[in-house]
Amino acid sequence: MSDTPAQGFDTLQIHAGAHPDPATGARQVPIYQTTAYVFRDSDHAAALFNLAEVGYIYSRLTNPTVGALADRICALEGGAGAICCSSGHAAQIMALFPLMGPGCNIVASTRLYGGTVTQFSQTIKRFGWSATFVDFDDLDAVKAAIDDNTRAVFCESIANPGGYITDLDAISAISDAAGVPLIVDNTSASPYLCNPIKHGATLVVHSTTKYLTGNGTVTGGCVIDSGKFDWSQNDKFPSLSQPEPAYHGLNFHEALGGMAFTFHSIAVGLRDLGMTMNPQGAHYTLMGIETLSLRMQKHVSNAKEVAGWLENHPAVEKVTYAGLPSSPYAERATRICPKGAGGLFTVALKDGYDACVKLVDSLELFSHVANLGDTRSLIIHSASTTHRQLSPEQQEAAGATPNVVRLSIGIEDPVDIIADLEQALAKATA
């Protein structure tokens, strides 16, 4: 939980959550490679387990290195508290866990990462939960999809794979009117480009694997709580607003107010789900975040230059980058992501699937991987990989049809990125 005073983004990305080690004076956050922590005495142990005192118990729940990362991301997102976990998918389940119950549903955007669509359409059924997928540009459809059993509205700020920008202000107004939280996956934007909490989000989730770490070394996830949602405004969230049988009857919202979600996610969520981030992974991400603003500026400037070049290439049917003046989301991008529309977009080729495959196989500078947000430029054919498990209709709704490739533009020299695309497109269309 962050107690960092108001400072600029560039300062927070280096200093938030970090203090010289009291034992050694070490300036960089140490890797606390330990499973457990010695209690001062029996009263101290009891106070920790009663949530009467904040401290370290067991590294499945809390760890100083992981805690420093949570504090830093929380400060960058402008939240009240944050919880780090093992992956972005883990973060999504962690976000939903205190809110849901058998028979409950979420209303989700059709424009989501393919793995998220599968998690929400298939996997969560095993918990007795369900999801309704809606085009979030159709605000009336979003309103109509919310019913008495809806417990959250879910979207991505910049959607993967196409770089679509969600109108967070309009969607949060709908979720607020329905008395349910808005959960925003901010992975593709990072807190440097977008602050969902300022646009009404209750919870923000990240795959820290991507832009936050930025170097393709470790997986991780994070959930940031705005601390602004009234969990007791209705009876939809008993785990937070009523005595929680999983934690000796504690009423989290009554006892902890704006920190209810954060403490519940640690005391119950991490305790029982065990989706723990390891401290070495947290350390890599902490180091990556120190250069986040610098990297994001370069990602954005490169993406604008590359997307503009691709838009005029004779082999290209369409480029979806919201940073282009021709994009239908250009105005929305300046409002939701004022520092830039990110480094992620798709390219549709006129010659279809075969040309996409040849393009991917002909690139030399680009890496063909199932990841995004790396310093390196990356490419993948979503329909046959990350979105392969979806139906053709779902692929089309997500912007991942067979004639489309997804580009994650890195921070290399843009001349070299364009040269690699130029030679590969020549081979793909020969």
Image: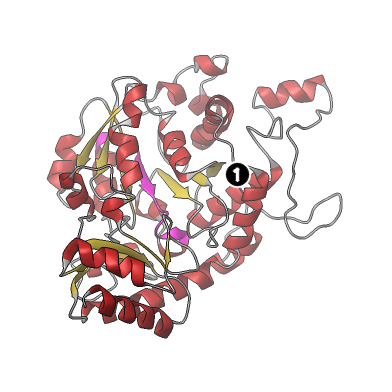
**Quarter of the image that includes the C terminus:** bottom left
Q: Residue at x 48, y 56 (%)?
A: 210
Q: Quadrant of residue 272?
A: top right
Residue 128 lies, with reference to residue 197, above or below; the image says: above
Question: Does residue 191 appear left or right of residue 233 in this picture?
Answer: right
Label 1's element? loop
Q: Which residue is mark 1?
A: 1
Q: Quadrant of residue 60?
A: top right
Q: Residue furthest right?
A: 24
Question: Does residue 6 appear left or right of residue 94 in this picture?
Answer: right
On the image, the x and y values in percent for residue 253 come to 49, 28
Q: Residue at x 43, y 34 (%)?
A: 93
Q: What's drawn in magenta, residue-wise?
A: 178-191
Question: In this rendering, does residue 212 appear at all?
Answer: yes
Q: Residue at x 25, y 65 (%)?
A: 356
Residue 337 or residue 94, whichever sits in front? 94
**Mark 1 neighbour density, 10 Å: few (under 14) some (14–19) many (20 or more):** many
- The number of callouts visible is 1
On whether residue 187 falls in the magenta region, the answer is: yes
Question: In this rendering, does residue 179 appear at all?
Answer: no
Residue 165 lies, with reference to residue 1, above or below; the image says: below
On the image, the x and y values in percent for residue 142 come to 18, 42
On whether residue 266 falls in the magenta region, the answer is: no
**Quarter of the image that includes the N terminus:** top right
Residue 127 lies, with reference to residue 36, above or below; the image says: above
Residue 398 or residue 223, whichever sits in front? 398
Q: Residue at x 26, y 59 (%)?
A: 164
Question: Does residue 324 appear left or right of residue 292 in this picture?
Answer: left
On the image, the x and y values in percent for residue 279 come to 67, 45
Amino acid on which disc 1 is placed: Met
On the image, the x and y values in percent for residue 317 come to 16, 71
